[in-house]
Amino acid sequence: MPLLAFLPLLLLQTASDTPPPTASRPPAGAPYAMPGEDAVDPYVANNANAGAIPFKGEAMAVAFHGQDGIRRIVDGFVTRNFADPVIGEIFQGHDQARLRRTLFEQFCYILNAGCAYTGRDMRSSHKDLGTQHADMNRLVENLQKAMAEEGVSFPAQNRFLAKLAPMRKDTVDR
Ligand code: HEM
């Protein structure tokens, strides 16, 4: 009987709960930089900055082993890029902590694994890097190695790379 007495209260509380944040928009007032990261010039956070429309459904998130898998892939990818004998130099002096966070958000958002992207758009974040097509190819190889290490299937790897491919025009100079 006492339990029944609480029932309306419980129902009322559930109904008035605010909906959970969705992957469709960044949290309001998303900060430009998180603690432990370098300051950056102000910009408007928007999922559109991620540069691609997310996959629909859960298949790609599952293929990448959810947020934990995406985190491992991004960590492997960033570590490889900074240590790379060919393109590593381009990354030196850039904020590795920020890159790990924003790349994770971007991949997670595009793979529809439940994140919002709060980083900068691809054109403005790459405008002063002077990267070339060969650098991009090398970067893609590093991503392929990181995805293979996580055990992502080749079809799923290729679907993801096809989503990123159009960003070449914004991230590469010539
Ligand atoms: C599809 C291609 C690419 C994607 C999706 C991508 C993604 C990103 C993201 C999400 C950021 C962080 C943005 C922010 O700080 O708010 C970033 C920054 C950066 N990217 Fe890329 N990137 C791509 C191509 C490249 C290439 C080809 C290179 C060089 C080989 C490169 C080097 C860098 C560097 C050095 C930064 C740090 C810039 C800074 O500190 O201001 N990226 N990239």
Image (cartoon, rainbow, N blue to C red):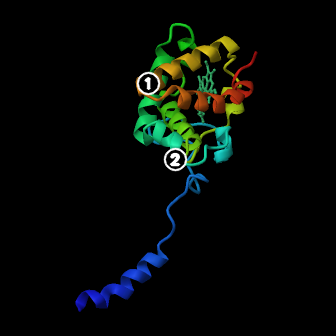
Q: Quadrant of residue 14 in the image?
A: bottom left
Residue at the spot x=59%, y=32% of the render? 160
Residue at the spot x=76%, y=15% of the render? 174
The residues bearing labels 2 and 1 have C-alpha atoms spaced at a distance of 23 Å
Depicted 7 relative to depicted 114: above or below: below
Q: In the image, which is nearer the foreground, mark 2 or mark 1?
A: 2
**Res. 132 in view:** no
Mark 2 — residue? 58
Q: Amino acid at mark 2?
A: Glu
Element under disc 2? loop
Mark 1 — residue? 76
Depicted 122 relative to depicted 54: above or below: above
For ligand 1, the image quadrant comes to top right
Q: Residue furthest top?
A: 85
42 lies left or right of 60? right
Residue at the spot x=57%, y=38% of the render? 106
Element under disc 1? helix
Q: Earlier in the sequence, mark 2 or mark 1?
A: 2
